[in-house]
Image (cartoon, helix red, strand yellow):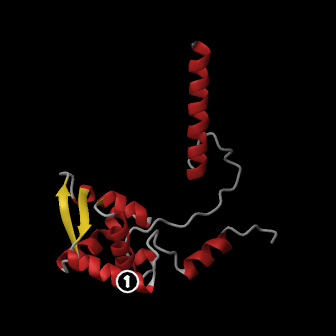
Amino acid sequence: MKVRKHMSVANTLAALAALGAAQGKSPILDSQKPQSPTPPIPETLADTGLPESMVEQILLKSLYFQGDTLGRDLAASLGLKFSVIEGVIELLKHQHLVQVKKSLGMGNISAIYSLTDSGRTVSREHLNHSQYAGKVPVPIDQYEEMVHAQKLPDS
């Protein structure tokens, strides 16, 4: 039993090291190794480099396919922080395209959102143009910037 407990701790440490390595925060990593640059996490809608209308369309289509969805899960499905999409959700609520079905009492992030009948109609119109409903895309200039930043010095 003791051996198994130590193996579990070792496995846990290995998993934490791997997780930390993936996030570039592990104290186990060799500090001499250069870390590859990572793109900044958008803090605002403007930081995404995308038109608000594109984020609105992807959000509506995501709700169309997912059905009733927690605010934090909706943000995760778009690959953004909830604070980035909160204004978009408020706008869509004012346009009567999105509604709050239920709130779990911890603010908008824990509210359950769904499409209204009008929201479903608008979502279907957007789906006629593009079926994509996933993570918001990265603008090509931001993508190119990261590719160049990660380029090896000898290439």
* Percent coordinates x, y for residue 2 in the rendering: 58, 13
Q: Residue at x 55, y 52 (%)?
A: 23
Residue carrying label 1: 126
Location of residue 33 with respect to 45 vertically, above or below: above
Q: Residue at x 56, y 19 (%)?
A: 5
- Tell me where residue 76 sits by quadrant: bottom left
Q: Residue at x 46, y 69 (%)?
A: 134
Q: Is residue 68 left or right of residue 2?
A: left
* Percent coordinates x, y for residue 101 in the rendering: 19, 61
Q: Quadrant of the N terminus?
A: top right
* Res. 120 in view: yes
- Tell me where residue 124 sits by quadrant: bottom left
- Tell me where residue 116 sits by quadrant: bottom left
Viewer-side residue, 114 vs 93: 114
Q: Please give the count of numbered marks on the rendered protein.
A: 1
Q: Quadrant of the C terminus?
A: bottom right
Q: Residue at x 28, y 61 (%)?
A: 68
Location of residue 37 with respect to 140 vertically, above or below: above
* Percent coordinates x, y for residue 87 in the rendering: 27, 73
Q: Is residue 8 left or right of residue 78?
A: right
* Res. 51 in view: no
Q: Is residue 34 left or right of residue 55?
A: right
Q: Amino acid at mark 1?
A: His
